[in-house]
Amino acid sequence: MVRPGRPSFSVRSRLIAAIGLLVGAALLAAGVSMWVVESRRIDQSIDAAISQEFAEFRTAFATEPTVGADARLSEFLARTLPDDGEIVWMFPTTGGPSYIGDADRNLLDSPRFSALVEDLRATGGLRDFTAGGERYRVGVLPVQQGDAAAALVVTRDRTEATEQLNDLLITYALVGLLALVVVLAASSWLAGRLLQPLSRLRDTARDISAGSLDERLEVTGHDDLTDLQVTFNDMLDRLEAAFSTQRQMLDDAGHELRTPLTVLRGHIELMDPDDPAEVDETKALLLDEIDRMSRLVDELLVLAKARRPDFIRLEPVDLQTLGEGVAARSRALADRDWRTDLSAVGEAMLDGQRITQALLQFADNAVRHTQDGDTITIGSGATSSSVELWVADTGPGVPTELRDEIFDRFTTTGSHDGFGLGLSIVSAIAEAHGGTVVLDDPPTGSGAVFRLRLPRVQDR
């Protein structure tokens, strides 16, 4: 398997870049919005100032309508004090214009400015005007004098009015850039702290091998990454348990297979091929050992499949029919006093074949630990949420020293020879169904009761 190369950009760098882009975009959007709003406010304030001049002119001469237009304009200019960047002009009916305010050569020397005023002399209005690289707002108010028309003209330097806004935007850009640098630095530090569990997870994953699964993450915090650390540690626990079980099973299987193989080899080497009786005896012994090894291999295969998703196949099973079928099959195992106590009714989601296999293993154990005429009972019980299936016998019971390890692999019971995989298979079947296998604690010498406790419906 080819391992991918180290990524050019780490999660930390990509996270910082994303934060930088988002913050930068937000600052830029705020700056553009501020420029649009302030530009519109400046335009509105300029138009309001020009309109105010026109209103003051109308108010001043509202009671003197007979005064000539040129005289009214001259008198208004004489008593007007323009604001900064503002020029008030008088375009008389005849002759050149006069003004009050700071002289602006861009307007005085521009024939286009005079042409603009002439265009608006009759109708009036507001127009934008550019001269010498400067932007102006021009307002024209017609003043009638008979058939002739004079004009009151107010100009305001828009470029000068926006200089403060430009200075503000430059200051905003510098402060925003500094803020972006601070945010990126803080994001880098915070991302390093937040992603530290992931770095530890990566380092731990690199250090883990099949022979060393004892590494664990130090769980810190109370967030999603904490859940990830706990989940990763749980996964390592399961892997370690699985590998430990696998190694133990292989070691035990090797040990158990070594004995029959040694027996086979020894008898073959010592067998006298010219002695028919010895040949027959050796043949019978070898076939028995081969049967034992075949049984071991079959049981190992069952255990190997126990953790596969298809180990069990759930379907509705009638509990009464299941118990009667197990009882019928068990009676063929040996001459015992077989009894039933099948009180469970209805259906449950089970793998009928696997459950039958488990109960027959219980029955086989009961047969091997009882004698002719002893009682063996196969029973069942159920509630709305669980099912119990059991096999009870009147044999000597399980020795106290074996009760804690009776379901371990390759555990033998008493003087009876066996590979000890049967009850391990039963335990695997119970776990696959989400249940447990239990050995009751009856008084010493009164037999043994093995139970399967299973949920009636499995969450799968």
Image (spheres, rainbow, N blue to C red):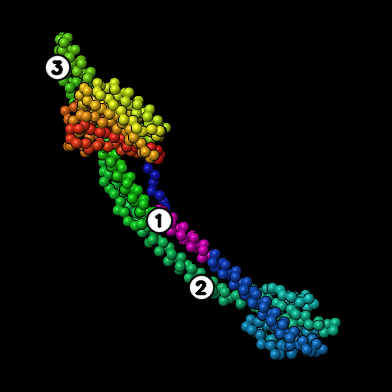
From the image, tell me which residue sits under label 3.
Answer: 270
- Of the two numbered discs 1 and 2 on the same chain, state the one appearing first in sequence: 1
From the image, tell me which residue sits under label 1.
Answer: 12
Between residue 266 and residue 444, name the one nearer to us.
444
Kind of residue at badge 2:
Thr
What is the crowding at mark 2: few (fewer than 14 residues within 10 Å), some, or many (at least 20)?
A: few
Kind of residue at badge 1:
Arg
Question: Mark 3 against mark 1, which lies toward the viewer?
Answer: 3
Question: Mark 3 against mark 2, which lies toward the viewer?
Answer: 3
Kind of residue at badge 3:
Leu
Q: SS class of the residue under badge 2?
A: helix
Between residue 184 and residue 260, name the one nearer to us.
260
| Residue located at (31% from left, 54% from top) | 219
Q: Quadrant of the C terminus?
A: top left
Between residue 202 and residue 171, name the one nearer to us.
202
Q: Quadrant of the N terminus?
A: top left
* CA distance separating discs 1 and 2: 31 Å
Q: SS class of the residue under badge 1?
A: helix
Q: Which residues are magenta?
A: 10-28
* CA distance separating discs 3 and 1: 72 Å
Q: Where is 366 relative to 46, above or below?
A: above
From the image, tell me which residue sits under label 2.
Answer: 171
Q: Position of residue 260 (x, y in %)?
A: 20, 24
What is the crowding at mark 1: few (fewer than 14 residues within 10 Å), some, or many (at least 20)?
A: some
- Of the two numbered discs 3 and 2 on the same chain, state the one appearing first in sequence: 2
